[in-house]
Image: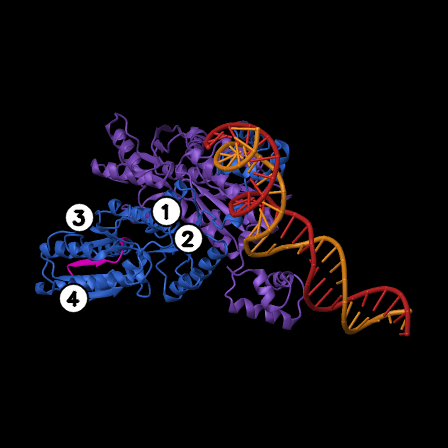
Chain colours: A blue, B purple, C orange, D red
Amino acid sequence: MVNYNDIARIAKVSPTTVSHVINETRFVMPETKKRVLDVMKKLKYQPNLLARSLATGKTHTIGLVISDIRNPFYPELVQGVEELAVKNGYNVFLCNTDYDIGKGLKSIGALIKRKIDGIIVASSQVDSSVIKQLFDTNVIFVLVDWCKRNIKADSLYFDYKVGIAEAISHLISFGHRNIYFISGPKELKTAEIRIRNFMDVIESNKSNDLNYKILEGDHKIDGGFRVAQKILKGKICPTAIVCSNDLTAIGAMKALQTGGVKVPEDISIIGLDNIALTEIVSPALTTIELERYRIGKTAMELLLNRIKNKELPKQTCTFKTKLIIRESTSERKNNN
Amino acid sequence: MVNYNDIARIAKVSPTTVSHVINETRFVMPETKKRVLDVMKKLKYQPNLLARSLATGKTHTIGLVISDIRNPFYPELVQGVEELAVKNGYNVFLCNTDYDIGKGLKSIGALIKRKIDGIIVASSQVDSSVIKQLFDTNVIFVLVDWCKRNIKADSLYFDYKVGIAEAISHLISFGHRNIYFISGPKELKTAEIRIRNFMDVIESNKSNDLNYKILEGDHKIDGGFRVAQKILKGKICPTAIVCSNDLTAIGAMKALQTGGVKVPEDISIIGLDNIALTEIVSPALTTIELERYRIGKTAMELLLNRIKNKELPKQTCTFKTKLIIRESTSERKNNN
DNA sequence: AAATATTGCGCAAGCGCTTACTCTATTTTA
DNA sequence: TAAAATAGAGTAAGCGCTTGCGCAATATTT
């Protein structure tokens, strides 16, 4: 592999000068510069960023920790991060935790050893052990959609409450009073926070005499399907179901339809995420939108800020969520 | 940051010994070893992989170049790669080319400067300039789903022809003779190869007196929708449509349904990819399955082999594709 | 014209590891 | 018991870059 010394020798300058022409970090006479550049081109020289990183202490590399790229929540977020990263000369290590805290800890450990300049943690499987690791190792990081709001770290949140409140109001205005919520797996932080927000909204609507119930799904289509089937078997049937994510809602809808129940005529359904699928299914799903691309991009922005200035005060950013009304909700028809 | 010298000094050994206990690369007396390990633990030492990589020439890092993580084709492939990579101690740089050859070239350049041990190129936007770059820089790489089969490089292919042949046979057996194909954007290699395979299959079925036409979509829902609308406006209407990918098929289906055409009663539709969506839409989409997770995983396997042994003969792997029959295809009813 | 400032670039140490080679002390062999 | 083998660990060069410091040559000031 050709290196600085080769270039320097052939261009008859010192390695220092080679470095300076590459990085444009001090003045070099045009002729000298040209000589160096010519040699570089002729030898097809590619600077070794490892060496550079070792010398400078910066890798221009970040880590992105997510739960599962197959979960439709993530691709847009990843896109947002990657795009802005590349635009700023960073490359991103993608780490899937597969919903496994152990894997998450290991991934973060690996990233730290690779001296990434920062980490974006957007995995729903993040608990205090992960947070502790982040703080202990003194690595720069940004938390996405992590439930504890009072943490002293850069963090980004979706304000689920707004969207859920809109959803509930929407249902109430349609005459619904018996509303079920199909949650995600309760050990997931992101599922937990959605449950809490749902309950808060229900609570603040108690003047409306709402009836509700929370059933646990798995944030996948199957779970929604299963839980909805169970609901159908029950004596009391809700007139509306709100789901912790779109996949659940779609599964539930499928189960209802399979069971001969019409959506939205018999039961209204609302999802959460607004993934592409929601426009495709029929009826198109009324859902709560999360701006995933934007949160990804913003996470990267915060990270860049923090990298530039470690002493910056804690940065926080909240993303409003909002109800997208489509076809899966309508006036309450039946009377159960 | 604490380093070998610190450990060595405190444990009263040489840096060499520290290295050897960490890497278990030569015998060290149990007591000595323990002393070193204890110091490491106490100082919460994290080896610097950059330095190690610089010294050894191996980074245990790979690059994965794809077009667009939001395209449902990719997440499972990425998962397959990442999972096996991590299992083998590798971390992966994810690069989106955004269907832009320039970005692809830049990404690959960046990866090379970062001294990744290998690259998996699974971007549909790969042309000869990219291939040239890969060969010129002498980097280890694996090509996924690249159209030119005679290239002298490790490569993985989907055998579209099998699946498409099954699809056409399926349609023929249902009495269809007038079959349209909605392709992807023709400049995409992956779209091109699908077109070619479709034509090959049509060609080998010419005894059946098939009528066909190829229309260009964009591999997205919108394109499918648009093209299908155009088809509806035409004088001659096919009785079946095969699409270059599932999104296109779903868009087309939506357009037909919107236009009052029943699927599959009036027109049958077949997709390609078998993304999760296909089971959700209604009618559920008959489609050609691509084992994306498996091709990702296998790509990583080939890459690992190649990394282990540069002199290995060229490796190739073909993945059969197969028709998954669901609800969007049926007996031909009308006579146009 | 002497003193001072500026310009352009080189020297060499260091970033944190690895590893070929070397060295001493102990054990084995004859 | 002297010579040879072995065991355990250290020395130092190097991986390819960056950068503080310094130096000679030229330009500017008084």
The answer to if A22 sits in the magenta stretch is: no
Residue B33 found in image quarter: bottom right
* Residue that lies at the very extreme toward the top in this rendered image: B235
> Amino acid under label 1?
Val
What residue is drawn where x is 57% and y is 68%?
B37
- Nearer-the-camera pick, C21 or B238: C21
Marks 2 and 3: which is nearer the front? 2
Label 4 and label 3 in one chain: yes
The location of residue B167, given as percent across then percent down, is 40, 39
Q: Which mark is residue B17?
A: none
Q: Which residue is mark 2?
A: A118
Q: Which residue is mark 1?
A: A81
Label 1 and label 4 in one chain: yes
Q: Which residue is mark 3?
A: A325
- Nearer-the-camera pick, C28 or A182: C28
Local secondary structure at mark 4: loop
- Nearer-the-camera pick, B137 or B140: B137
Q: Which residue is mark 4?
A: A236
Q: Quadrant of the C terminus of chain B?
A: top left
Mark 1 / mark 3, whichever is N-terminal: 1
The location of residue A158, given as percent across then percent down, is 26, 54
